[in-house]
Image (spheres, rainbow, N blue to C red):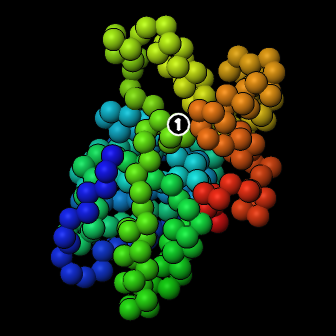
């Protein structure tokens, strides 16, 4: 998807940043917002369900939710859930559907700064604009756990497509297990792999990261070498 950046009205684009600790298993029932929202599970893992797709949102990613989009949220791993609320009339982004984005270290630090210093007007306006400028859409197949509702279309059920679809389903199930604290070895067995190394290689190929990054034993950014990790 190519970013669509219209000419917004003047003024600060961010309305508020809402953060709170959410427990595992907590559910936010189906609802919608009048404003755009960047949903980021800063130190948690959440599932966001929309009409067309389920999204598993780990700390490395966030989900752009356009104003008016019906969605529900379930927390798989407890932690800090962050919602960046954006004014549709003053926003430089106009993506019409939910869109996955990476939370880079720079975006992470900007959000944390804006949350801690909400009254710094001039600096805040620059930081807010920079957050929206840096957001780039990630294709569905590059977003961890993004899964369309239902099986693939009939035209995609030829053997190679069916194998790929099944692999993605297994990796999505693995993500859920890992988010709940299951070890890599136990997760590999649960989704049908006898060798954890084979599972890890497939997981890395499909998701783009090693499965250990989702394990509770690895939580601090200093322990993670992947440059796109922004959990803080």
Q: Measured from the top left, where is residue 209 in percent x and y? A: 66, 43
Residue 185 lies left or right of residue 112; in this view the side is: right
Decide: is 121 above or below 144. Answer: below
Residue 109 lies left or right of residue 215; in this view the side is: left
Viewer-proximal residue among 56 and 77:
56
Which corner quadrant of the image does residue 208 belong to?
Answer: top right
Q: Residue at x 31, y 55 (%)?
A: 3
Q: Measured from the top left, where is residue 171 in percent x and y? A: 61, 28
Q: Residue furthest top?
A: 159
Q: Is residue 46 visible?
A: yes
Q: Residue at x 33, y 11 (%)?
A: 155
Which corner quadrant of the image does residue 52 belong to?
Answer: top left
Q: How many marks?
A: 1
Viewer-proximal residue among 230 and 80:
230
Decide: is 189 above or below 10. Answer: above
Q: Measured from the top left, where is residue 210 in percent x and y? A: 71, 41
Q: Which residue is mark 1?
A: 145
Mark 1: secondary structure? loop
Q: Within 10 angstroms of label 1, few (less than 14), some, or many (20 or more) residues? A: many
Q: Measured from the top left, where is residue 20 in percent x and y? A: 54, 64
Decide: is 126 above or below 201. Answer: below
Q: Is residue 24 visible?
A: no
The quarter in which the C terminus is drawn is: bottom right
Viewer-proximal residue among 142 and 125:
142
Which corner quadrant of the image does residue 131 belong to?
Answer: bottom left
Residue 80 lies left or right of residue 32; in this view the side is: right
Q: Residue at x 54, y 23 (%)?
A: 169
Q: Residue at x 41, y 17 (%)?
A: 151
Residue 177 lies left or right of residue 8; in this view the side is: right
């Amino acid at each position: 998807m190519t970013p669509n950046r219209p000419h917004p009205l003047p003024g600060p684009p961010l309305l508020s940043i809402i953060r709170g600790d959410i427990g595992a298993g907590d559910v936010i029932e189906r609802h919608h917002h009048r404003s755009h929202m960047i949903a980021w599970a800063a130190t948690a893992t959440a599932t966001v369900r929309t009409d067309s797709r389920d999204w598993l949102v780990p700390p490395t990613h966030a989900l752009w939710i356009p104003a008016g989009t019906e969605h529900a949220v379930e927390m798989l791993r407890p932690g800090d859930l962050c919602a960046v609320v954006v004014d549709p009339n003053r926003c430089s982004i106009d993506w019409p559907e939910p869109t996955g984005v990476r939370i880079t270290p720079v975006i992470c630090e900007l959000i944390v700064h804006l949350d801690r210093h909400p009254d710094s007007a001039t600096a805040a306006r620059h930081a807010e604009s920079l957050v929206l400028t840096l957001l780039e859409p990630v294709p569905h197949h590059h977003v961890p756990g993004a899964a369309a509702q239902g099986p693939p279309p009939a035209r995609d059920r030829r053997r190679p497509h069916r194998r790929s679809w099944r692999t993605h389903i297994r990796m999505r199930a693995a993500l859920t297990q890992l988010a709940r604290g299951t070890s890599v070895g136990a997760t590999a067995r649960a989704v049908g792999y006898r060798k954890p190394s084979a599972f890890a290689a497939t997981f890395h190929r499909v998701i783009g990261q090693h499965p250990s990054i989702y394990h509770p034993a690895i939580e601090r950014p200093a322990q993670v070498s992947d440059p796109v990790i922004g959990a803080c």
